[in-house]
Amino acid sequence: MKRKMVWTGVSFSAGMFFASGFPGDMQIPLMLGILLVSAFFFNKAGKKFIYFAVSALFFINGTLLYTLYDAFVYEKIISYEGKEIFYSGEITGIKDYAEDKSEYRLSGKINNEVRAEIIYYGESLDCDFYDKISFRCTPETFKNTFLFNKKDYYESSGCFLQTDSISDMEVFGKEGFSLRKIIFHYREYTEKKIASVLPGKNGALISAMLTGDKSGLGDTNKKELYRCGTGHMMAVSGMHLVLVVSLFSGLLKSTGLSGKKRFLFTETVILVFVIFSGMTVSVVRAAFMMTLICGAELFGRRTDPLNSLCIASMLLLVCEPFLIKNASFLLSVSGTYGAAVFAPYIISDMKEDSFFDKLKIKIITVFCISACVFPFSVMFFDNISVIAPVSDIILIPLCTCALLCGFALAVSGGIDVIAYPVMMLGGLMSKLVFHISSVLAGSGAVTIALKKNYVPVLTLFLTAFVIFTEVKYRKRRYTFLALIIATGIFMISPSVYSFMNRNVLSVYRVGNTRSAAIIVTLGKNADIVDMTGNAKSSEYAAKLSDMYEIHRIDSVSFLKNPYQSMASYSEKLSLNSIEHVYLPEETYIDYGIDICGCEPEFFGEEGIMIDNSRYRIEADNENGVKIFYKDILIHCTPSEIITDEGIYKERNIALRISQDGGFSAYSLE
């Protein structure tokens, strides 16, 4: 049996992925169905029975391991929700926020019995990485919200409980030598050095690529990079590790050291980088792969990226089964598969004689990587960039150069004679990145929304179509043609969907009673009414505009207390085209000041009326927002939506009314 680890690794991971998506009472019948269908395809492909037997065995093992972990580890830990516990452990992560608030990730035991990780968010403590800490608290489980899927994020990394209130706290500094603490402190020193030599967003971009800390970047900068498909450079990933190891290995080969010594030095660099990066999932995965690849060279074995990827994935999943739901893990694995396996397979017969041949190969490579990552992007992201295959060719080299400047500063210890010249070069590269991304992101609709109801089904169908073509014909050109066809169908799908829904009125109420906003859309028309005057409302409005591709907004209206909201909306909706902004007439602003990119208009105590011929909005402080569409009235307040069909008190809800009066409501969470 050839490439055993591929068969076992893929089957094991598929079993875990299957178990994570279905409840326990559905797993056995569905598993039997999957195994029967798999047996049919294995037989049609002419594979020996041993291939099916091994694959089926590891598929079942993956399913069982996830199910057992869920029943005996996860359920046991979350059973402490709402109960007072005594927790003791060590601090493994610290994130500082404004107003002397911090988030601490802790690893230890509940009541000295059950090992668990906990997130504590509260007043900043006088403590350090890997200090010992103990306290009493009443923990809660995580909850997903419209703005952030907190439950999915933390649980997929093995943390199931949180608390924001503790008592009887004690902190003990860890004595003796700690490599992890030294590396973390050096990471903080590096960030401060970059900020002092290159302040502002240019230095913040280098810090983000080097350490993953994006706090120094504004929302507009981050959104522009993500819209260009280059946002992944701000998350320290396996690509960063591969770059470091490749450079270091090249230097070691020129020293004449033996293979064993080069391997030991390389492993030391890998270990330090993994800790320096915060031990992110993608970096740990890459560390396993690089170790296997370097080890294969040491022992005279042929390296196989797919084998290494499967081994690394299995090791991580066995240690933490819930990683199968982790966005970083799935995107890292699929991206690595695209870069190391699928793209080389597609381009293997292509010529590299001329500049244009090489450019074509680069575009196809980025396109193949994007295609492999895309199905998982649908699971986790609001939108995806359609210009990434082109923009990455321009921006990735610039980002890589800036990143190397950051590496140079970190490796040199931040001495001024090196820090200043490399940061000047890195700053120039960062400035070019921001300028190009700003031009590209502002050039029009460069993203496709992924939260529309047809996207998951269409993605599943198109993915199956490409896989079937490869399995059926086993020819590169047919597989690539199928990929092109699938991409074309998906690219035109938003236009088809918009045309089919051109006469459907959508009303969204987002936020809560303290930060509520109403967004109304019909065809190409969109209006936003902020009802509460809370700066948080802009985050909800911006999130919704990204989810549903609302690029052009006819009007933004502030019913009350606009001072808190104006700056926030201007920042959060900076990449949206806004035609009108309406403010209460008593609002004072300096002459010539633009709000959301346009000159504000004012309305009196009677409120505001917006009529675009297809629907009408009437809004004031006393009565909230009334939307008139045909013979239908929708009355919105910060706490509820009232219609002839019923009263809706749910937070973050959407109503859809078709041209013939058909009515539907659904939650946005």
Image (cartoon, helix red, strand yellow):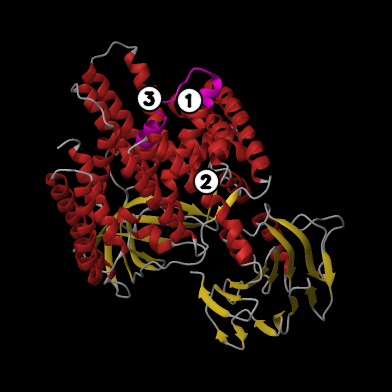
Q: Under tag 1, what secondary structure?
A: helix
196 vs 54, left or right, is: right
Residue 607, percent from left and from top: 79, 78
Q: Identify which amino acid the numbered label 1 is placed on.
A: Ala
Q: Can you identify the residue that label 1 sits on?
A: 408
Q: Assess disc 3: are there few (<14), some (14-19) or many (≥20) residues with their C-alpha within 10 Å of its C-alpha.
A: some
Q: Assess disc 1: are there few (<14), some (14-19) or many (≥20) residues with their C-alpha within 10 Å of its C-alpha.
A: some
* Inter-mark Cα distance, 2 to 1: 20 Å
Q: Identify which amino acid the numbered label 2 is placed on.
A: Lys
Can you say which quadrant of the picture contains the N terminus? top left
Q: Under tag 2, what secondary structure?
A: loop
Q: Quadrant of residue 459?
A: bottom left
Nearer to us of marks 1 and 3 is 3
227 vs 68, left or right, is: right
Q: Can you identify the residue that label 2 sits on?
A: 214
Q: Is residue 469 above or below residue 143?
A: above
Residue 389, percent from left and from top: 53, 38
* Inter-mark Cα distance, 2 to 3: 25 Å
Nearest the eye: 56 or 388: 56
The first of marks 1 and 3 along the sequence is: 3
The first of marks 2 and 1 along the sequence is: 2
First to last magenta residue range: 340-359
Q: Can you identify the residue that label 3 sits on?
A: 246
Residue 327 in magenta stretch: no
